[in-house]
Image: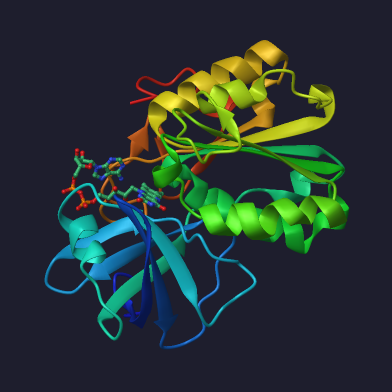
């Protein structure tokens, strides 16, 4: 009989804590042994003496000796994560859940739509797509935040990723809800980036991640534009404890977000109650 403890975390040392916005920080972790995941999967992050909570790694799935997690402060555990300092010891367990099915994106135009801290899982996915870029027809990346100050990965996006469109078939549509005098990109909700979309929707998949209200309105607009509900991939979040399909806190209808998700196509969950809760 296997007596290994599935809840035992892997020890990690905090290497850095990066302030992304007034409410969001990225924690850079060095695991005590190699840790691999696929884009879209999540981990359970333990702060000793405080508790644990689920997060999707935001770093490259091709890197196994370092892991980055981007965390919005909302309560007990996230507050403790925001107080971490270089050298602190924390734990992770996982990876859990199903990743984005990259094989199903092959030869298609891949539309990424991320808002706020929802850019975190999309960043890991973007790294995965870039690593296999020749497999996709094109990547269109739509991203939004409330204000320029709330934009996570702003320097990375504006100084590095935008330049990728010179080398790869990638284009960006960047917006904030309300701009300031220095903002040179779009203004308006992230749904506005879907206006006049020059994508062949019949050969495209859309990947959406953000707060529930944003995912709802982006999904409705994608349907309106002509996306099939089976071509819309949503990264779902629910209150979660065990992360391994036991505690039932994360159910959407009959589906466990922790093991059937967290990535679901819209057609698979659209008739379940409280999809946008
Ligand atoms: C698969 C998955 C991946 C996630 N990835 C990220 C990520 O990359 N970055 C990030 O910042 N957050 C992510 N979250 C959300 C994150 O898990 C919650 O913000 C965190 O659990 C809150 O813990 P807390 O102790 O700080 O808050 P609590 O003190 O427990 O609660 C504070 C508030 O947040 C609400 N809340 C708690 N847990 C969740 C949850 N899982 N989803 C939605 N609301 C919740 C509570 O209802 C309450 O209103 C993810 C959640 C899931 C399920």
Split into 4 quadrants, where in the image is the N terminus?
Answer: bottom left
> Percent x, y for residue 159?
64, 58
Number of labels in the image equals: 0
Q: In this view, does 218 lie above or below 22?
A: above
> Percent x, y for residue 118?
46, 43
Q: Is residue 187 visible?
A: yes
Instruction: Answer left or right for 123 relative to 134.
Output: left
Q: Can residue 257 be seen in this view?
A: no
Q: In which quarter of the image is residue 29?
A: bottom left
> Percent x, y for residue 277?
33, 26
Image point 41% across, 58% down: which residue?
70
Between 28 and 7, the one nearer to me in the picture: 28
Image point 75% across, 23% down: which residue?
197
Q: Is residue 244 above or below residue 12?
A: above
Q: Is residue 236 above or below residue 25?
A: above
Image point 71% across, 51% down: which residue?
162
Instruction: Answer left or right for 11 relative to 68.
Output: left
Residue at the extreme top of the image, as rendered: 224
Model colouring: rainbow
Image point 25% across, 51% down: which residue?
73
Instruction: Answer left or right for 96 relative to 123.
Output: left
Between 24 and 61, the one nearer to me in the picture: 24
Q: Is residue 39 above or below residue 235?
A: below
Instruction: Answer left or right for 105 relative to 211.
Output: right
Between 175 and 65, the one nearer to me in the picture: 175
């Amino acid at each position: 009989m296997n007596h290994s403890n599935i809840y035992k975390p892997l020890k990690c040392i905090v290497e850095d804590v990066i302030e992304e916005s007034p409410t969001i920080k990225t924690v850079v972790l060095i695991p005590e042994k190699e840790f691999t995941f696929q884009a879209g999967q999540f981990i359970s992050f333990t702060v000793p003496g405080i508790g644990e909570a689920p997060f999707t790694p935001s770093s490259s799935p091709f890197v196994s000796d370092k892991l980055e997690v981007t965390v919005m402060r909302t309560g007990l555990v996230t507050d403790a994560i925001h107080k971490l300092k270089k050298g602190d010891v924390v734990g992770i367990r996982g990876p859990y859940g199903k990743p984005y099915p990259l094989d199903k994106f092959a030869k298609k135009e891949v539309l990424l739509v991320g808002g706020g801290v929802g850019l975190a899982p999309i960043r890991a996915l973007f790294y995965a797509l870039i690593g296999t870029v020749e497999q996709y027809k094109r990547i269109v990346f739509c991203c939004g935040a409330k204000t320029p100050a709330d934009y996570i990965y702003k320097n990375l996006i504006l100084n590095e990723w935008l330049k990728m469109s010179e080398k790869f078939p990638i284009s960006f549509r960047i917006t904030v809800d309300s701009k300031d005098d220095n903002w040179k990109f779009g203004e308006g909700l992230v749904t506005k980036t879907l206006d006049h979309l020059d994508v062949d929707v019949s050969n495209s998949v859309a990947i959406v991640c953000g707060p529930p209200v944003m995912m709802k309105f982006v999904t409705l607009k994608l349907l309106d534009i002509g996306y099939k509900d089976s071509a819309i991939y949503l990264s779902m979040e629910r209150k979660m404890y065990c992360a391994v399909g036991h505690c039932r806190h994360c159910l959407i209808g009959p589906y466990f977000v922790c093991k059937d998700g967290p990535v679901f196509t819209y057609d698979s969950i659209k008739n379940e109650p409280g999809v946008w809760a």
